[in-house]
Image (cartoon, rainbow, N blue to C red):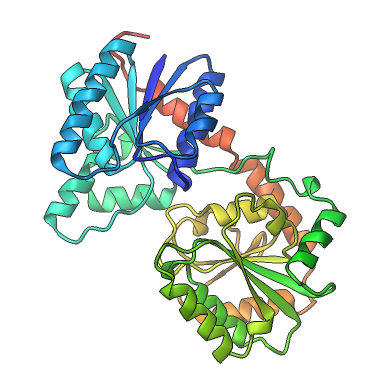
Amino acid sequence: MKILQITAALEQGGVERGTVEMAAFIVSQGGQSFVASQGGRMVKDLEEGGTRHFLLPLASRNPMTILYSAWQLRKIISREKIDLLHARSRAPAWAAFFAGKLTGVKMVTTFHGTHRIQNRVKKWYNSVMVRGVRVIAISEFIKNHILQNYSCSADLIDVAPRGFNPALFDPDLINIEQQQALKQQLHLPSGVAVVSLPGRLTRWKGQLLFLEALAQIQDLPWQALLIGGSDKKNAYIKELKRVVQQFEIADRVTFAGAQENIVPYYAISDLVVSASTEPEAFGRVAVEAQAMAKPIIASAHGGSLETVRDGDTGWLFNSGDAIDLADKLRAALSGNIDLSKVGAVGRQWVTENYTIDKMCQKEWDAYQKVPRINGH
């Protein structure tokens, strides 16, 4: 079975990671894996895992560039005798859609996000993500979004929740000495609870809401970490630094920056927060935190409603409500709850339900439902 995944780029992010993880799984199942993208730092990992990569300008939304990519994909499909196309974002999906029409090869898509619907033109542009013969949704939330907004039968949608890599997200991999060294590096005092919010420094990830909630629990002992990089415009990070000064918590909040390996940062955290003000399509942070046996406090919308068991593996707070978030933080940090027990339950929960193997197996199962022209 020869499968060609088509995605915009392979630089960073959940879509890209899912592409690389699925490519490795295809190879593990005895299939032949191909990926077309605009390239990026993950290409090396892809090729080391046995996948062939084709460089095309697939991140471009220019109609002429999309048609050029479609023509190039047609050549690849014919030359490599591709059995199935798997598109993961909109512009690449249009190129794949046209290439599929030219060659007769079927396409499946993975619907990774809600994709804003501002007008009819935008909705039509987004609709390519339901033009595959199978549509893979990364959560029940995304499945419901598809059914509410697009003409797609529920029978054609396969839900394949994202997952974590157990070989990487394992609490036993980071020993006490390593944790202490990192805490010293970050100037974190010993014996004080560490509360982390991982996520790119962008407004919808809820850092401002998090800081507002922290300002309401200054009577408790805690140190906070904001883990994530910012884009080229640094106005938001400047705003965040002004806010910590205004709330008089600057000495208790550390901006840790972007981290290639976030696992040690989960390891030194006592509590992890996902405060997104818009629904997460899935939300890997909630699952990764639980995989590291850390209780999670998450906004009660989107994928978190599926991955966080409220009061069991963590807590859900009313989206956008700093007071409710502060109340949940206070309850968790009050000393009346055994956070290690909550973390242990969370780790068991996600290990049973949200690993990359389970994710990839569900995408593979969707592939098996597609009739292919070569009859494999």
Q: Position of residue 356 (x, y in %)?
A: 57, 37
Question: Would you say 121 lies left or right of 204 here?
Answer: left
- Which sits in the foreground, 94 or 59? 59
Q: Left or right of 147: which side holds 304?
A: right
Q: Quadrant of the N terminus?
A: top left
The C terminus sits in image quarter: top left
Q: Is residue 26 above or below residue 235?
A: above
- Residue at image location 42% in from the left, 68% down from the top: 204
Q: Position of residue 129 (x, y in %)?
A: 27, 41
Residue that lies at the very extreme toward the top in this rendered image: 375
Number of numbered discs on residues: 0
Residue 132 showing in the rendered view: yes
Q: Residue at x 52, y 14 (%)?
A: 30
- Work out whether 111 lies above or below 280: above
- Please report the residue visible at 31 percent of the width from the left and 15 percent of the height from the top: 372
Residue 319 showing in the rendered view: no
| Residue 359 coordinates in the image, percent (x, y) | 52, 36
Task: Out of 275 and 188, give the one closest to the viewer.
Answer: 188
* Residue occupying image coordinates x 66% and y 54%: 290
The x, y position of residue 329, in whole percent, is 65, 76
Picture quarter containing residue 167? top right
Residue 260 position (above or below residue 42): below
